[in-house]
Amino acid sequence: MMRRLSSLAILFALGGCASQAQPDVLEKIVFLGRHGIRSPTLSPQEMQHRTGHTWQAWSVAPGEMTQHGAAALAAMVQAVQRNYSASALFQGAETCQILEQETVVWADTADHRTRQTGDVWAKEIAPGCAIKAHWATTGVDPVFNALGTQAGQIDRGVLEQEFAAATKTLPEPVSHNALKAVQSLMAPDACSESNSSPQCFLGATKIEWKKGAPHLQGGFVTAGMAAESLLLTYAEGLSLADFEVADKDAPHVLEAVMPAHEAENHLLRRLPEYARARNGVMAESIRAFLSDGPVLSIPGISPSTKVLVLAGHDTNLAAMMALFGLDWSFPDQPDSTAPNTVLAFERWRHADGSRDVRIRVFHQSLAELRQGRAPDIETSTLTLSPSRPILFSTQ
């Protein structure tokens, strides 16, 4: 009898160990991705007017995603899909039918490049399936930009206080060194007599209000735009020879100038009040989806939806940094919100029934963007710890 009781005790103990060893289950996921490589949003003539330097014409109209950009984006989404292919969300005997029922791809309607990006995600996140991307039928979608709507009202006093504080926390000396680097590339003589020239980037950056919305004015605006345009040019596979930069030196030059673009984000896009007004609807939609609440701003989401893809902009990524208390940078990519960068919100269920959200960032290095290659997800992924809650308190 004692031997039998001992055997039962061992079985119960083993059963307890087996229960404790049950793996966590990925239940839901949100992918927020920036669009693929695009041309500068301004014409070459306007770029020259603002920067004092000539810019080459691209194969597409200003602000459009290129063929190379679409290919590099597809490589990125394929890598992300492979990373999750073994999870319960992407497995099953009738995978396509399930994925089509459980996946929503929602793109920003405001730009052709984001709608194209939604189409790429719909095709590559479930290869061979019939998932379709959707977007708003109106010209503006408050999920991606609520400024100008009732949900996007800004408290001017709060924002100006945040801006004043942000000017004192710029990473230095790299931010102003970046201004000088861009200046020497674009218009080295523009600041020789005074800082009054619009092509001199060394003056103060300030906030101006137009129709109730804040806009940055000053050096970091033009220098940040020029720096990002240089990065996009290189990522497209084009030469920076017009700026007397050899291909072999381009990564180093971009590393030097891109802090100007990061500073532009720091001074406005990552201010909590600006992010709340512009992208609070997006943040609350993500929280509601992961908390099994109703998502009223995105059509097509039902209780059975498990995968939500949002195809947007770098401004959306910057806003999520501010609203969820996130921060990241990459050793091989000087743009923290570069084309194709993906922020993933994963909801996991533990063996005891509790849940948590894990946040990861996927990106392509500068070389991978230029070559249109997929990233090595295992070595390049960052796992983030948000300083603000993701799930609603009822979870």
Image (spheres, helix red, strand yellow):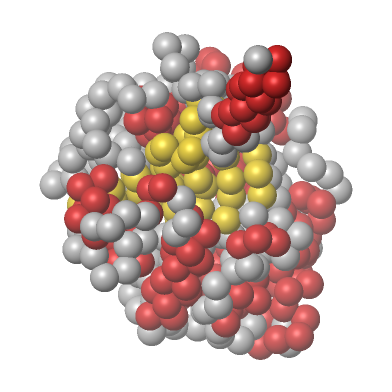
Q: Position of residue 282 (x, y in %)?
A: 38, 34
Q: Position of residue 304 (x, y in %)?
A: 24, 36
Instruction: Identify which residue is drawn at 29% across, 35% down.
Output: 142
Q: Residue furthest front?
A: 1
Q: Residue furthest top?
A: 394
Instruction: Identify which residue is drawn at 24% across, 51% down.
Output: 98
Instruction: Identify which residue is drawn at 33% across, 25% down.
Output: 292
Q: Pick the quarter of the image with the C terminus.
A: top left
Give the quadrant of residue 364: bottom right
Give the quadrant of residue 227: bottom right
Q: Residue furthest right?
A: 173
Q: Is residue 117 left or right of residue 207?
A: left
Q: Position of residue 229 (x, y in %)?
A: 55, 67
- Of residue 143 and residue 164, the one placed in the foreground of this image is 143
Q: Pick the quarter of the image with the N terminus.
A: top right
Instruction: Identify which residue is drawn at 63% across, 68% down.
Output: 376
Q: Position of residue 225 (x, y in %)?
A: 56, 59
In the image, residue 224 sits, relative to residue 64, either above or below, namely: above
Q: Is residue 105 left or right of residue 156?
A: left
Q: Is residue 12 visible?
A: yes
